[in-house]
């Protein structure tokens, strides 16, 4: 029987829509070391699972034509598929069609998959590669962006939203990824900025280029906007798949439990001697985290930004957790403006999706300095307090060494409604360090002594014996137990099991007013 011509026409149309802006432009995309929208989706999702939506949509306001025919898809490929068997909604801008620029219909297509993701309770991943607002469509393209920004904001905390920035993301377009939970960039291939180098030069006279203005290194290390970066499209997509494995589908579900290959009862002897006896000698909290979590499961986020703090996803005994900590080998683990922003936003993320938080504390307090004060360290630091205090997800904290002053209170102390609080024998929980305290408390006594230095030393030691140990806090009930460092892993596993069905709600209100 001859084939139905309507089926042949459909096949022809599908073939055309798959070619986006045509073979030449695809070649150009490959020559830049970039994959096409469809190739990216195929690598992101489990093989063969992608189902496309709205492939025949065309621009209404301005015909994007190729060889006299309207281009199908309007510069974005949208649909759904699976990652490790879990449904994910996805959209990928197609740079071969008018530079992936966003017009009215592209905006509608993206909004549609976002709506489907929200109502079906599944994560949504956007792959961005676009020249921004489609100039020919004027106000209609702005409307398209506005629709997306509104959804990014309203679905925040409903379903996880991840952006893969894999090319240009310029102008107001950059607001969509930052309204989402995570941004992954591709080194040297992607950039985000509000105003480009030419505009900056004409307004301020400053010379810059795309890479230093808004490349991956800039947004990972300086602005703190990006969470991860990878050397290629393939690696970035693999990172996104890995990130999804830690996240729940939506705010009503628990994050996935994965049968651990690593013994939940494993006790690593190295932990017992990892904190140096001399409190001034640094060690790496990264090492502590790696030794406690399921082997190889720590996925650090914002690794080159505010390195005095560390955040990331991990598994402990198969349970997905958010890790927060100080890094005592950088700025002695003190808290500053950038660290506060980094920690607070991550705590808010974990709480919004009920991912348990495990906090490792070693901080001498907030970083002193005029720049910090003038920059609003009080306001920024308060974000940590606000985030922990309001978080109703399971919270566990371990004080490994210093927990002084405001840093003690803010960093998931028992006062912040933390469910389980442990301290190592090396913990020093106090208002401040011994030297400073003795100088203030016993100034006259030291001055009047025959040998002031010896007196200072003696009084400092007295203070240490009295306050700088975990037992004073344990006696006061401010920590639940003092544990051997090597016991940390099994103790956390036990706590996570217990807290799995935690139910807590703050008092009814429209929403709080976080210091931002
Ligand atoms: C329409 C666009 C476009 C745009 C690129 N193209 N950007 N078409 N609207 N915004 C088209 C080009 O004409 C070209 O078409 C194709 O896409 C590829 O672009 P090239 O310039 O050849 O590519 P490349 O050299 O890689 O440069 C990419 C680029 C550059 C850096 C993104 O195209 C660029 O600077 N574009 C303009 C960026 C911009 O100013 N956007 C508006 C920002 S304001 P052909 O037919 O030749 O293939 C904004 C406001 C949003 O976005 C506000 C929301 C709140």
Image: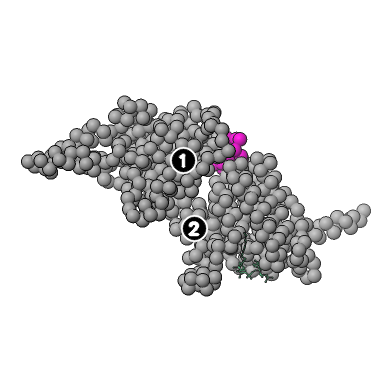
- The answer to whether one can see residue 447 in this image is yes
The residue positioned 55% from the left and 53% from the top of the image is 178
Asked which secondary structure carries label 2, the reply is helix
**Percent x, y for residue 280?**
26, 45
Q: Going by the picture, which residue comes out furthest to the left? A: 450
Q: Is residue 400 left or right of residue 247?
A: left
Q: Residues within 10 Å of mark 1 (few under 14, many from 20)?
A: some
Q: How many marks?
A: 2
The residue positioned 51% from the left and 34% from the top of the image is 392
> Which segment is the magenta one?
245-255
**Is 313 placed above or below 371 here?**
above
Marks 1 and 2, how far apart at CA: 25 Å
Could you tell me what secondary structure mostly forms the magenta stretch?
loop
Name the one closer to the observer, 506 or 213: 506
**Percent x, y for residue 222?**
45, 58
Q: Quadrant of residue 399?
A: top left
Q: Quadrant of ligand 1?
A: bottom right
The residue positioned 39% from the left and 49% from the top of the image is 377
Name the one closer to the observer, 409 or 203: 203
Q: Which residue is denoted by mark 2 in the rendering? A: 219
Q: Which residue is denoted by mark 1 in the rendering? A: 386
Name the one closer to the observer, 319 or 106: 106
């Amino acid at each position: 029987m001859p084939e139905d011509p309507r089926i042949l026409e459909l096949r022809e149309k599908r073939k055309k829509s798959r070619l986006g802006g045509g073979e030449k432009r695809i070649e150009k995309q490959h020559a830049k070391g970039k994959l096409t929208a469809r190739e990216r989706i195929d690598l992101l999702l489990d093989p063969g699972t992608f189902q496309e939506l709205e492939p025949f949509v065309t621009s209404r306001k301005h015909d994007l034509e190729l060889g006299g025919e309207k281009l199908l898809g309007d510069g974005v490929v949208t649909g759904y598929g699976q990652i490790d068997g879990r449904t994910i909604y996805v959209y990928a801008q197609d740079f071969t069609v008018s530079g992936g620029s966003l017009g009215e219909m592209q905006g509608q297509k993206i909004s549609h998959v976002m709506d489907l993701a929200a109502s079906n309770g599944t994560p949504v991943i956007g792959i961005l590669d676009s020249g921004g607002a489609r100039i020919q469509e004027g106000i209609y393209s702005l409307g398209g962006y506005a629709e997306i920004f509104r959804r990014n904001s309203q679905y925040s905390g409903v379903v996880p939203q991840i952006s893969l920035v894999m090319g240009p993301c310029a102008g107001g377009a950059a607001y969509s990824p930052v309204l989402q939970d995570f941004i992954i960039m591709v080194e040297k291939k992607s950039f985000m900025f509000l105003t480009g180098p030419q505009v900056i030069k004409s307004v301020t006279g400053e010379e810059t280029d795309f890479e230093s203005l808004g490349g991956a290194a800039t947004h990972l290390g300086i602005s703190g906007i990006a969470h991860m970066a990878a050397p290629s499209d393939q690696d970035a997509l693999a990172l996104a798949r890995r990130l999804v494995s830690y996240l729940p589908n939506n705010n009503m579900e628990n994050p996935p439990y994965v049968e651990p290959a690593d013994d939940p009862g494993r006790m690593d002897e190295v932990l017992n001697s990892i904190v140096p006896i001399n409190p001034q000698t640094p060690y790496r909290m990264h090492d502590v985290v790696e030794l406690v979590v399921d082997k190889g499961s720590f996925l650090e986020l914002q690794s080159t930004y505010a390195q005095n703090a560390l955040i990331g996803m991990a598994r402990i005994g198969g349970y997905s957790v958010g890790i927060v900590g100080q890094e005592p080998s950088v700025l002695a683990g003190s808290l500053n403006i950038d660290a506060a922003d980094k920690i607070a936003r991550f705590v808010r993320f974990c709480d919004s999706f009920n991912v348990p938080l495990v906090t490792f504390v070693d901080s001498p307090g907030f970083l002193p300095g005029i720049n910090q004060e003038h920059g609003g360290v009080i306001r920024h630091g308060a974000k940590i307090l606000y985030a922990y205090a309001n978080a109703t997800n399971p919270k566990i904290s371990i004080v490994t060494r210093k927990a002084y002053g405001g840093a003690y209170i803010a960093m998931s102390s028992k006062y912040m409604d933390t469910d389980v609080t442990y301290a190592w024998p090396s913990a020093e929980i106090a208002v401040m360090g011994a030297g400073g305290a003795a100088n203030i408390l016993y100034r006259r006594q030291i001055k009047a002594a025959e040998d002031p230095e010896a007196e200072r030393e003696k009084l400092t030691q007295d203070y240490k014996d009295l306050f700088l140990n975990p037992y004073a806090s344990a006696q006061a009930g401010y920590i639940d137990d003092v544990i051997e460092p090597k016991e940390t892993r099994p103790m956390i596993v036990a706590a996570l099991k217990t807290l799995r069905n935690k139910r807590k709600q703050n008092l009814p209100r429209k929403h709080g007013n976080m210091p931002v």
